[in-house]
Structure formats: structure tokens, C-alpha cells
Amino acid sequence: MAKMGKYCKAYPIKWLRAYSHWSENAQNARTEAQLIDGKKVQVVRVLGDEEYLYLQENLIVTDGIFIDQNIIFDDITDEWKEFCRNDLAFDENGFQKIKERETVSSASADLDEAV
């Protein structure tokens, strides 16, 4: 069964391809139905520059929201981590920060109602 992580963010593939050591496992892309010679078949989709991929909390890139399926890039180096943080403005702790902001907003709203 597919596993969903806590946090991922979609990026245009052309942004990811800007990484100097980018190499993609295109054969791992999701499949899509196509009509070939009158028959419906599943084919691996082509990853063009207009497509989006998902940068997961563990810095693996997937073609879909699941953290353990359709892995396109998984060469996690210090240089990749730096690229994700600096060039993509990705924060692997993003989910935790969102939850913290929600908690603060909720507490602030509760305080406003009490006054």
C-alpha cells in the first residue's frame, strides 16, 4: 500500500532540472491510459518541462503525492539539500511549521473570543 508522507510540495520539473546534478528515473513516472490501435493501454507518461513533480519531506522527488512510489530522483547529497533550501525555498519541516501557525492562530482566536 502506498505511503503518504506528512509534507510535500509540487514544483515544475524545469525548476528541479536546474539542479546541476539532476538525473531523473523517467521510467518510474506514473502511467496513464492511452488509446493505441483502438486498445486502451497504460504507458509511462512523458516528463515534459510543463509537468510538476513532488519534493517530499525526505528530499526525494516523486511523480505523485506518495512518498514511496514513482520515485524520480533520490540522490540526496548536501549539495541537493542546499539547492532545495536556497533555490527552491523548500523547508522539510514545513508541515510542523504549518501546524504551529494553526495552533497560534487558534489560540489567538480563542483569546479574542474570551475578551
Image (cartoon, helix red, strand yellow):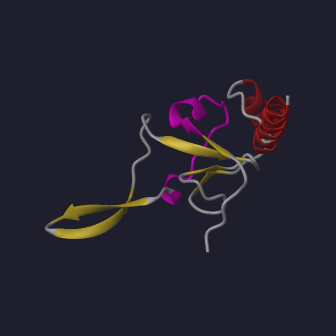
The residue drawn where x is 79% and y is 43% is 99
The residue drawn where x is 70% and y is 24% is 87
Task: Using the image, determine if residue 98 lies above or below residue 65.
Answer: above
Q: Is residue 39 left or right of residue 85?
A: left
Extreme bottom residue here?
Answer: 1
Q: Position of residue 76 (x, y in %)?
A: 77, 46
> How many labels sit on residues?
0
The residue drawn where x is 60% and y is 34% is 16
The C terminus - image quarter: top right
User: Can you tell which quarter of the image residue 15 is in?
Assistant: top right
User: Can you tell which quarter of the image residue 70 is in?
Assistant: bottom right
Question: Bounds of the magenta span?
Answer: 10-28
Query: Is residue 13 covered in magenta?
Result: yes
The N terminus - image quarter: bottom right
Of the pair 81 and 107, the residue shown nearer to us: 107
Q: Position of residue 20 (x, y in %)?
A: 66, 30
Of the pair 92 and 82, the residue shown nearer to us: 92
Task: Using the image, determine if residue 97 lies above or below residue 74.
Answer: above
Query: Is residue 91 covered in magenta?
Result: no
